[in-house]
Amino acid sequence: MELNNIECISDITDEDEIHRLLHPQFASSKPQIHPTTSVHELLECPVCTNSMYPPIHQCRNGHTLCSTCKERVHNRCPTCRQELGDIRCLALEKVAESLELPCKYCTLGCPEIFPYYSKLKHEAICNFRPYNCPYAGSECSVVGDIPYLVTHLRDDHKVDMHSGCTFNHRYVKSNPREVENATWMLTVFNCFGQYFCLHFEAFQLGMAPVYMAFLRFMGDETDARNYSYSLEVGGNGRKLIFEGTPRSIRDSHRKVRDSHDGLIIQRNMALFFSGGERRELKLRVTGRIWKEQQNPDGGVCIPNLCS
């Protein structure tokens, strides 16, 4: 029997009833939809329990699952073990088109309601979605709101916490030639009622080892634009200065680093700043954070420096 391009059939025919009587072994495999079963439950994939989006697949006994899980179960129905083929449940896809659902982050404050097929796109960029842990030294899978992540960074990653809008950090390394993608330090600052992550690390930029410092804002990009920061490093009568806007932690650590959006110090220059016989890295990085305020007279941003 050719199974390609078979559509989901919702009407029960006499032939269906005869088939069930002649083949009772398949009766239990038919999906039993009770009056109390919600449409939301019907649209839930039985394997991953996520909402299903087109193409919604079904076996010939009517059991449905999402396209991602179809590959995971090796084209076998997880309920009755029948081969899935390429059967689409078009009826369920049509039902989904008529639904309007709240964002899944409604319990976190999102008030929006969307058509079923627009909901997923919104949730990927929803401002109320949890943040990923900004710690760069490991692939940490923790997510949460900002207060939760601050506590997580302090208690689980043992990150240094500071209050104030200025910083003065000294980085020392006995063997500056060892820079194999080694994340060195993350420090969290609390100022203006917000939290900022200061990263400093060594990595290979092409064939050349470099050191990089940059700031990330613990919040969304729109709020990050309200702040600016500067970083300065120097020694032996020379100095490098960087000024910019902190990136949101919505952007991954790697994305910010690979965009070179921060203070980059070549190793030869870093050793020059370190002085001595250039055998040990000794860098002092200073900086400050300020909030841009709108001038009510001229409409120009003026810096608001914390004391």
Image (cartoon, rainbow, N blue to C red):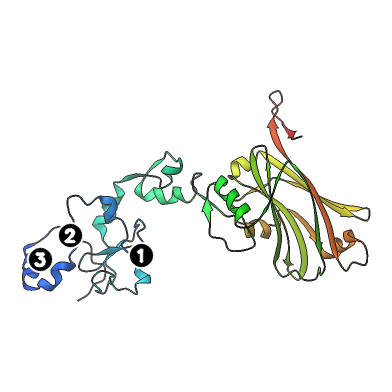
Tell me the distance, in whole angstroms, between the alpha carbons under discs 1 and 3: 27 Å
**Residue farthest to the front?**
155
Q: Secondary structure at mark 3?
A: helix
Lateral position of residue 119 relative to residue 307, left or right = left
Tell me where residue 225 appears, x and y as whole percent: 65, 41
Question: For the residue marked with disc 1, what is the amino acid?
Answer: Ser
User: Sequence-wise, which precedes: disc 2 or disc 1?
Assistant: 2
Classed neighbour count for the residue bearing mark 2: other residues with Cα under 10 Å, few (<14), some (14–19), many (≥20): few
Lateral position of residue 37 relative to residue 55, left or right = left
- In the rendered view, tell whether residue 201 sits above or below residue 39: below
Q: Which residue is mark 1?
A: 67
User: Sequence-wise, which precedes: disc 1 or disc 3?
Assistant: 3
- In the rendered view, tell whether residue 270 sits above or below residue 36: below
Q: Which residue is mark 2?
A: 32
Tell me where residue 109 appears, x and y as whole percent: 45, 40
Tell me the distance, in whole angstroms, between the alpha carbons under discs 2 and 3: 14 Å
Q: Quadrant of residue 115?
A: top left
- In the rendered view, tell whether residue 176 sits above or below residue 223: below
The C terminus sits in image quarter: top right
Q: Which residue appears at 28% of the width and 54% of the height?
A: 41
Mark 2, mark 1: which one is toward the viewer? 2
Q: Quadrant of residue 252?
A: bottom right
Answer whether residue 250 is visible to the viewer in this image.
Answer: no
Q: Which residue is mark 3?
A: 16
